[in-house]
Amino acid sequence: VQLQASGGGLVQAGGSLRLSCSASGMNFRLYAMAWYRQGPGKQRELVASISSDGITVYVDSVKGRFTISRDNVKRTVYLQMNSLKPEDTAVYHCNTDAWGRAYWGQGTQVTVSS
């Protein structure tokens, strides 16, 4: 399984970014996908997840601002991030659990300036 994340960058507070994570080596449509983040000096936290049938879950701090979605044809999961805040600054990783273990993308840096 390989997960390739992209789309991070530097943005001003209130701005938007869209992260993408393409997957290979797995039957993508069968597995839940998730985005985690780890900010400076913070523990890694689950930001959002989407099940194989499209059910989504969000951490409270991003509800109403972030949207996770998936395209099973493109084997890609997205994280649309709107109304970004400085506290959203972190390295964002995509994740899936398959065959009894967790797989992680390489991470993409999101920096939100105030």
Image (cartoon, helix red, strand yellow):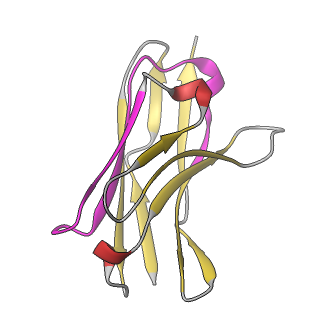
Q: Nearer the viewer, residue 45 or 113?
A: 45
Image quarter where the C terminus lies is: top right
Q: Which residue lies furthest to the left in this view?
A: 73
Is 25 within the magenta?
A: no
Task: Tell me if 20 is positioned left or right of 47 in this view.
Answer: left
Q: Which of 23 and 111 is in front in this view?
A: 23
Name the residue: 50% across, 56% down. Answer: 34
Q: Quadrant of residue 75?
A: bottom left
Task: Tell me if 22 is positioned left or right of 47 in this view.
Answer: left
- Tell me if residue 114 comes above or below residue 40 in the rendering: above
Q: Residue furthest right?
A: 41
Name the residue: 41% across, 67% down. Answer: 4
Name the residue: 73% across, 49% down. Answer: 44
Q: Where's residue 102, x and y in %?
A: 62, 75
Q: Where's residue 82, x and y in %?
A: 38, 23
Is 78 within the magenta?
A: yes
Q: Where's residue 24, x and y in %?
A: 34, 81
Instruction: Point out the stretch of residues depicted in magenta.
Output: 66-92
Task: Tell me if 86 is positioned left or right of 15 in this view.
Answer: right
Task: Tell me if 104 is positioned left or right of 15 in this view.
Answer: right
- Tell me if residue 35 comes above or below residue 86 in the rendering: below
- Tell me if residue 52 comes above or below residue 9 in the rendering: below
Q: Where's residue 43, x and y in %?
A: 80, 46
